[in-house]
């Protein structure tokens, strides 16, 4: 199930060899990530890891030439796993996350799993995108979408 973007239209693309400006935008995106997503990494270290990790595909939403949100998809034992879904604070609530999800869902040919910090916004987002919450504990939730 795909949802229309409520406010703006974005171009979603795979980022594998980012320009200096794209890399700067990715760092800004992950600078706005909750610390529990970054774990012990700096935003710069996380971007380097995401771009170099084998099997990871980094998707980003672009508007007016700038990257506003990003997410990673990689093979997992039960299907595909999406991680590191983050939207810049200045661009939140404008449809960036749902646009990224819609793009990935359209490409997927197996179930997609997401493990993210749980809050009202993520619950609403994944529910609207058609994901089923499998469990939630200690501030995290695990969702699945059968495609």
Image: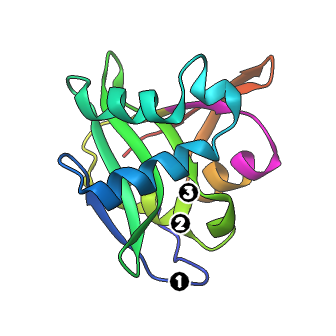
Q: SS of the residue at dot 3?
A: loop
Start-end of magenta stretch? 114-123
Earlier-in-chain disc, 1 versus 3: 1
Residues at badges 1 and 3 in contact (C-beta under 8 Å)? no
Whether residue 104 is visible to the viewer of this picture, yes or no, is no
- Of marks 1 and 3, the one in the foreground: 1
Residue 143 in the image, given as x and y percentages of width and height: 58, 34
Circles 1, 2 touching at the beta carbon (< 8 Å): yes
Query: Residue 87 at what x, y percent from top left?
Result: 58, 55
Q: Residue at point 68% right, 25% down?
A: 36
Check residue 122 for magenta coloring: yes
Above or below, 26 relative to 47: below
Q: Position of residue 98 (x, y in %)?
A: 53, 62
Instruction: State the CA–CA distance, disc 2 to disc 3.
Output: 13 Å
Residue under label 2: 96
Q: Local crowd at mark 3 within 10 Å, few (<14), some, or many (≥20)?
A: some
């Amino acid at each position: 199930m795909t949802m229309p973007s409520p406010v703006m239209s974005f171009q979603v693309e795979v980022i594998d060899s980012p320009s200096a400006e794209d890399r700067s935008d990715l760092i800004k995106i992950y600078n706005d990530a909750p610390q529990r997503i970054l774990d012990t990494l700096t935003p710069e270290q996380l971007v380097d890891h995401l771009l170099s990790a084998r099997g990871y595909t980094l998707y980003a939403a672009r508007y007016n030439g700038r990257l506003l949100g990003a997410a990673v998809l990689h093979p997992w034992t039960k299907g595909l796993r999406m991680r590191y879904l983050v939207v810049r604070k200045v661009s939140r609530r404008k449809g960036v996350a749902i646009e990224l999800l819609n793009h990935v869902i359209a490409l997927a040919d197996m179930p997609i799993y997401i493990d993210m910090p749980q809050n009202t916004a993520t619950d609403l987002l994944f529910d609207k995108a058609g994901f089923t919450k499998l469990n939630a504990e200690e501030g995290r939730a695990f969702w699945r979408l059968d495609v």
